[in-house]
């Protein structure tokens, strides 16, 4: 109860942040998800972690509404007719976004924004479109106060896409996160270069390997940090194996491989199954929420994200003196484990996961603010990066191939990169051809920084550090993560 | 080949991401040279080189020549250079050979390009244009383009700046490369207004604009701002030219119809 009172009395939380924290606290007074003794043990050790997903889930964690369908048919529950012009579209989307739930209580996916907008701007000048877009994006940034929120662009070049990039560069906001789906056969170099150049000013957009990610489902979108999920569905849950903490429970490497890891994998998968069953069978979400009843999401288009974090520290733990990222031995051990987890996920029978062929899908989880000395997913720890960016990206490609629901690299670039975005595009093309799946850039002098996948402003982190209230609750997560992950020391790439 | 340095990720030596290979040795002595350590040539190929181009000796404008760092120069077999290039694939779109003055080793570059072209990469040459490209038709055919320095138009200014008399060769190369569709860029280094040497930038631009292919093909003209970093000799304490001065050149070049930039 002290916790709850401290939420009520806090002078660092905004009103909205207090309401959300109180709702979360109320949910956590329940205990409705069956858990075995061993599962409880792994949870208590922090080696299985549900990322504060709440004890009684009443909506899927990530929801990817089919916005195209909504725009085409309207939304009865919200008394919204299909929009007929650009103003109506933007108001339509603002209202709809307000009602899309998720783990953050804000929408994590805003749709293929360029494609949604393109048909509505034919008769408007660039200036007219940009003025309206500007207000729309400012509205999103100030009301979706959590940067685990994503809009998508591409792979086709559109006028809307170019204008979104132009406005985004002027605004320099943390929300929405933008990703360009990039396909060298579809996306013109000039458009991709414009996107990369924009990212060197405002850390947005990130670049997604469309060729490798598109085949994951029939229609995919990028949500939250960099999650690859089916449009018209989403993910029920994301739970993660915290590999370095799991490693410490084992007597030795063999004990880990033969006993600890198999048991923990089973415990986590069973736990996720129980969460899914609760959402589908008891929460009432799919029976009552308008997104489901109006067909904007379909129950059989949800997956279960089987997360892992700290592959690097796990490998380094069992091989003292070796370094994941630059030592072949550490990389080989890491790949053996990753292949083992991947194999488990691909064979586990998970309820209500039709679109994933009834299995779990691996996710390179980015980490949370309380992870100390644990590197995101399969990334190389800050400070251990290979000297050559090429070796860095080759390494990523090797490990990304196991991860279908999201993995990424974040590369800060020297400001000289601004003079030649085509050169950075060449590097992206090479990396993607080798199997790297998703990459984000920002410039070493940018106010906006990509923490682990989401964006936070350095200036906002300074405010939060001084004990002041900040608008975005992702600043709360980002500030400690920026420090504990030594993100300021990321290897800056450039000439 | 006598190699000073290989950069596996260069974003400033031509379009896209490239491997830049800096060869050792230069035949002229530019006052604004920012890597004078690449000027001096290893004794072992002095004779061969001096047949292909007159060498400017130690010059008043750019001394001392830094002979003490000659140890860093490697005489690399072409196969080793190709191996280094391959290690950067598929992240690069091509290579650029620079210097020093790379054309002093033209026959070697030809052998290198033959192999690199077969890898599907583009090959560019960054040259001061003092060695006639007409001597190397096969190399010209192999390469995808030449980035040519036009340092001054007036012979006296050219001499004062470089210590050399072969500005006419540069002009011949300019025409030759334009007509062969191999001129990928013209580069002009600009000194500040208060420099002891006055480069005739406006005259260079005016003369470039008189070449119809420069305008019709919109060949990029790049105005580079002088930077004191690395410079030895009489210009070492000079500052960068002001932004306004650069903008003046840009406006003038644009009025002439040239495709100019200062990046």
Image (cartoon, coloured by chain):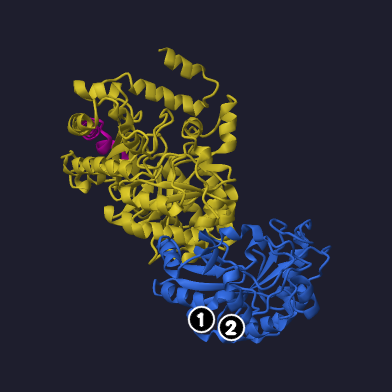
* Residue A287 covered by magenta stretch: yes
Locate the C terminus of chain A by quadrant: bottom right
For the question of whether residue A35 can be seen, the reply is: no
Closest to the observer: B155 or A23?
A: B155
Q: Which mark is residue B148?
A: none
Q: Is residue A207 above or below residue A246?
A: below
Assess whether mark 2 and mark 1 are in contact (beta carbons under 8 angstroms).
yes
Residues shaded magenta: A272-292
Q: Residues within 10 Å of mark 2 (few under 14, many from 20)?
A: many
Could you tell me residue A493's position as x and y percent? Answer: 51, 50
Residue found 36% across the figure and 34% down from its top: A313
Q: Report the residue that reaches farthest toward the top.
A: A2
The answer to whether residue B75 is left or right of residue A311 is right
Residue under mark 2: which chain is it in?
A: B
Q: CA distance from mark 1 to mark 2?
A: 8 Å
Coordinates of residue B98 in the picture (x, y in percent): 57, 68
Of the pair A24 and A422, the residue shown nearer to us: A422
Q: Residue at x 39, y 33 (%)?
A: A374
From this viewpoint, is residue A126 visible? yes
Q: Is residue A56 magenta?
A: no
Circle 1 residue? B139
**Label 1 is found on which chain of the structure?**
B
> Which chain did the renderer colour blue?
B
In the rendered structure, the colour chosen for chain A is yellow
The residue that mark 2 highlights is B133
- Name the element at disc 2: helix
Vertical side of A370 occupied by B71: above or below: below
The answer to which of marks 1 and 2 sits earlier in the sequence is 2
Q: Residue B197 lies in what quarter of the image? A: bottom right
């Amino acid at each position: 109860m002290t916790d709850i009172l401290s939420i009520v009395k806090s002078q660092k939380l905004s009103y909205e942040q207090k309401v959300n924290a109180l709702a979360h606290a109320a949910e956590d007074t329940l205990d409705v998800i069956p858990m075995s003794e061993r599962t409880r043990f792994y949870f208590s050790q922090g080696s299985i972690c549900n990322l504060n997903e709440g004890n009684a889930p009443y909506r899927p964690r990530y929801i990817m509404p089919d916005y195209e369908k909504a725009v085409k048919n309207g939304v009865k529950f919200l008394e919204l007719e299909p929009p007929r012009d650009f103003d109506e579209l933007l108001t339509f989307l603002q209202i709809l976004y307000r009602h899309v739930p998720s783990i953050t209580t804000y929408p994590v996916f805003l749709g293929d924004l360029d494609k949604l907008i393109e048909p509505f701007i034919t008769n408007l000048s660039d200036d007219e479109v940009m003025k309206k877009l500007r207000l729309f994006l400012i509205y999103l940034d100030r009301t979706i106060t959590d940067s685990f929120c994503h809009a998508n662009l591409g792979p086709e070049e559109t006028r809307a896409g170019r204008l979104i990039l132009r406005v985004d560069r002027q605004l320099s906001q943390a929300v929405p996160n933008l990703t360009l789906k990039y396909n060298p056969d579809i996306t013109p170099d000039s458009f991709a270069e414009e996107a990369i150049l924009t990212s060197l000013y405002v850390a947005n957009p990130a670049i997604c390997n469309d060729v490798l990610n598109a085949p994951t489902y029939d229609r995919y979108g990028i949500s939250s940090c960099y999650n690859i999920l089916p449009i018209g569905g989403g993910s029920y849950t994301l739970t993660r194996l915290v590999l370095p903490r799991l490693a410490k429970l084992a007597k030795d490497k063999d004990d880990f491989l033969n006993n600890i890891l198999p048991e923990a994998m089973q415990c986590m998968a069973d736990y996720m199954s129980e969460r899914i069953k609760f959402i589908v069978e008891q929460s009432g979400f799919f029976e009552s929420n308008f997104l489901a009843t109006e067909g904007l999401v379909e129950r059989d288009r949800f997956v279960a994200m089987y997360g892992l974090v700290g592959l690097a520290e796990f490998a380094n733990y069992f091989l003292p003196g070796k370094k994941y990222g630059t030592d072949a031995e550490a990389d080989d051990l890491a790949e053996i484990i990753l292949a083992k987890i991947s194999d488990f996920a691909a064979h586990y029978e998970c309820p209500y996961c039709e679109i994933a062929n009834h299995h779990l899908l691996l996710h390179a989880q980015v980490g949370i603010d309380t992870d100390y000395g644990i590197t995101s997913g399969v990334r190389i720890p800050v400070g251990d990066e290979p000297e050559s960016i090429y070796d860095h990206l080759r390494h990523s490609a090797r490990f990304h191939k196991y991860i279908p629901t999201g993995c990424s690299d974040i590369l800060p670039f020297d400001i000289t990169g601004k003079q030649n975005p085509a050169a950075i595009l060449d590097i992206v093309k090479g990396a993607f051809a080798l199997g790297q799946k998703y990459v984000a850039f920002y410039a070493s002098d940018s106010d906006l920084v990509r923490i682990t996948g989401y964006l936070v402003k350095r200036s906002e982190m300074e405010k939060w550090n001084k004990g002041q209230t900040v608008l975005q609750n992702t600043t709360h997560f980002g500030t400690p993560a920026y420090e504990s992950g030594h993100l300021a020391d990321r290897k800056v790439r450039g000439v | 080949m006598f190699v000073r340095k290989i950069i596996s990720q260069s974003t400033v030596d031509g379009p896209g991401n490239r491997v830049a290979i800096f060869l050792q040795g230069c035949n002229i002595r530019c006052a604004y040279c920012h890597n004078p350590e690449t000027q001096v040539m290893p004794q072992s190929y002095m004779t061969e080189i001096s047949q292909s181009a007159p060498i400017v000796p130690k010059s008043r404008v750019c001394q001392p020549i830094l002979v003490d760092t000659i140890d860093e120069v490697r005489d690399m077999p072409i196969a080793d250079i190709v191996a280094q290039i391959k290690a950067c694939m598929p992240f690069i779109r091509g290579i650029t050979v620079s210097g020093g003055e790379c054309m002093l080793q033209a026959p070697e570059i030809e052998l290198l390009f033959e192999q690199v072209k077969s890898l599907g990469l583009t090959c560019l040459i960054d040259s001061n244009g003092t060695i006639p490209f007409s001597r190397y038709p096969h190399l010209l055919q192999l390469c995808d383009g030449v980035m040519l320095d036009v340092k001054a138009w007036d012979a006296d200014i050219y001499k004062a700046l470089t210590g050399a008399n072969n500005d006419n060769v540069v002009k011949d190369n300019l025409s030759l490369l334009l007509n062969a569709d191999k001129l990928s860029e013209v580069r002009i280094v600009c000194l500040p207004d208060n420099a002891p040497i006055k480069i005739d930038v406006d005259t260079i631009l005016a003369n470039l604009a008189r070449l119809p292919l420069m305008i019709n093909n919109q060949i990029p003209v790049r105005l580079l701002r002088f930077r004191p970093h690395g410079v030895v000799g009489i210009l070492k304490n000079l500052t960068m030219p002001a932004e306004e001065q650069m903008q003046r050149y840009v406006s003038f070049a644009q009025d002439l119809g040239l495709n100019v930039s200062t990046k």
